[in-house]
Image (cartoon, rainbow, N blue to C red):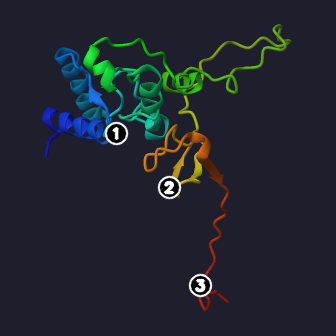
Amino acid sequence: MSLTLETVRKRAEADAKTNGYYLIPQPELLQMFLEGLKTNEERFGYPVCPCRLGTGNLDIDRDIICPCDYRDPDVAQYGACYCRLYVNKPTYESQNLPQVPERRPKEKIDRAYGTPTPQQQPSTTNTTPTNPQPQTTAPKQSPEVKKRLWYCKQCGYVVYREEPPYVCPICRAKQEMFTKIDATIEFREPPGNSQA
């Protein structure tokens, strides 16, 4: 079954209604955003926000899968999410779309664009090398994402990702209500299976 624009629309409408939001009131912009979501889902296999750069690496893109991690705090603070697909009632009724600054951390944006993060930057303490070497371009490596388990102290939701979501998708608790779970998994041979 292929993805249709109507399926994307119904999913966005259902999510908006569930969370007390509305979809952008301008039909042309709404159509453009829905087409962007459809294209991104066909391209990557998941609906990356139509206003952000998706990489095709789920670990890097996880926070910008629509509805993104930043939607709820953006709507609460500005009346709309970053791309303005989701808006609150006053914004919907006034049809005045606010400017919403990017909330996604710069490190995550840089990772998506393949820009070296400060930890990946070469050291510049010695600017005059003693043995000048010809400059070579190293092949781009996919940045490593260090995932861990996070536990919502309010409802018990557990998620495995780099950082906890801004808002718990189950109980709507803020990011501060998540705590990291440190776990060790040990594999043992079942009794009687030892090779002697």
Could you say which quadrant of the image residue 43 lies in? top left
Secondary structure found at label 2: loop
Say what amino acid the circle numbered 1 marks. Answer: Asn
Between 93 and 121, the residue placed more toward the observer is 93
Is 8 placed above or below 103 here?
A: below
Residue 2 appears at what percent x and percent y?
A: 14, 41
Q: Are marks 2 and 1 in contact (CB under 8 Å)?
A: no
Q: CA distance from mark 2 to mark 1?
A: 18 Å
Between 75 and 6, the residue placed more toward the observer is 75
Say what amino acid the circle numbered 2 marks. Answer: Tyr
Q: CA distance from mark 3 to mark 1?
A: 48 Å
Q: Which residue is mark 3?
A: 190
Residue 87 appears at what percent x and percent y?
A: 33, 25
Q: Is residue 134 left or right of residue 46?
A: right
Sooner in the amino-acid sequence: mark 3 or mark 1: 1
Name the front one of labels 3 and 1: 1
Residue in the picture at 41% in, 33% down: 68
Q: CA distance from mark 2 to mark 3?
A: 31 Å
Residue 39 appears at what percent x and percent y?
A: 24, 28
Residue 85 visible from this viewpoint: no
Name the front one of labels 2 and 1: 1
**Which image quarter holds the C terminus?**
bottom right
Q: Which mark is residue 157?
A: 2
Residue in the picture at 34% in, 26% down: 88
Secondary structure found at label 1: loop
Q: Are marks 2 and 3 in contact (CB under 8 Å)?
A: no
Say what amino acid the circle numbered 3 marks. Answer: Pro
Q: Which residue is mark 1?
A: 19
